């Protein structure tokens, strides 16, 4: 059960990070302006908060083997990328 909780939390973490990066991409462009710096700052703060909240959850799930954590994280990144790609229309079946 702890392994399922770990996988779901990793999936949600990576999904949120991908969505934030996807939607903030249109605000960050080459000639950096004040708006670009605000978007980068908001992106950094939100990712730091999400990772911090996720690390508190993982403290209770610390007895999962490292190999399983690595494998679950890789699977979560791949599935989150496919899921967000399908939801945003970047991947068409």
Image (spheres, rainbow, N blue to C red):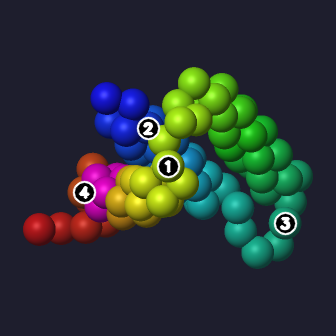
Tell me the number on the disc at residue 12.
none
Q: Is residue 80 left or right of residue 25?
A: left
Q: Which residue is mark 1?
A: 65
Which residue of the protein is positioned furthest toward the bottom in this rendering? 30
Distance (Cα) linking label 4 and label 2: 23 Å
Q: Earlier in the sequence, mark 2 or mark 3?
A: 2
Residue at 60% over, 60% down: 25
Q: Is residue 84 left or right of residue 91?
A: right
Q: Which residues are magenta?
A: 79-84
- Number of numbered labels in the structure image: 4
Distance (Cα) linking label 2 and label 1: 11 Å
Residue at 85% over, 53% down: 37
Does residue 46 appear in this view? Answer: no
Residue at 86% over, 60% down: 33
Magenta-drawn stretch contains 82: yes
Q: Which residue is mark 3?
A: 32
Residue at 57% over, 24% down: 60
Q: Is residue 8 above or below residue 20?
A: above
Q: Say which of 12 and 60 sits in front.
A: 60
Magenta-drawn stretch contains 45: no
Q: SS of the residue at dot 3?
A: loop
Q: Say which of 6 and 53 sits in front.
A: 6
Q: Earlier in the sequence, mark 3 or mark 1?
A: 3
Are there few (<14), some (14-19), or many (20+) residues within 10 Å of tag 3?
few
Q: SS of the residue at dot 2?
A: helix
Q: Are marks 3 and 1 in contact (CB under 8 Å)?
A: no
Does residue 34 appear in this view? Answer: yes
The x, y position of residue 31, in whole percent, is 82, 72
Q: Is residue 58 above or below residue 11?
A: above
Q: Which residue is mark 2?
A: 6
Q: Nearer the viewer, mark 3 or mark 1?
A: 1
């Amino acid at each position: 059960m702890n392994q399922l909780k770990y996988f779901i939390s990793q999936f949600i973490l990576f999904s949120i990070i991908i969505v934030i990066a996807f939607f903030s991409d249109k605000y960050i462009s080459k000639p950096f302006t004040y708006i670009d710096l605000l978007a980068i700052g908001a992106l950094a703060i939100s990712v730091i908060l999400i990772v911090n909240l996720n690390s508190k959850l993982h403290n209770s799930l610390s007895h999962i083997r490292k190999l399983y954590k690595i494998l679950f994280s890789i699977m979560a990144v791949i599935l989150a990328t496919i899921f967000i790609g399908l939801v945003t229309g970047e991947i068409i079946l």
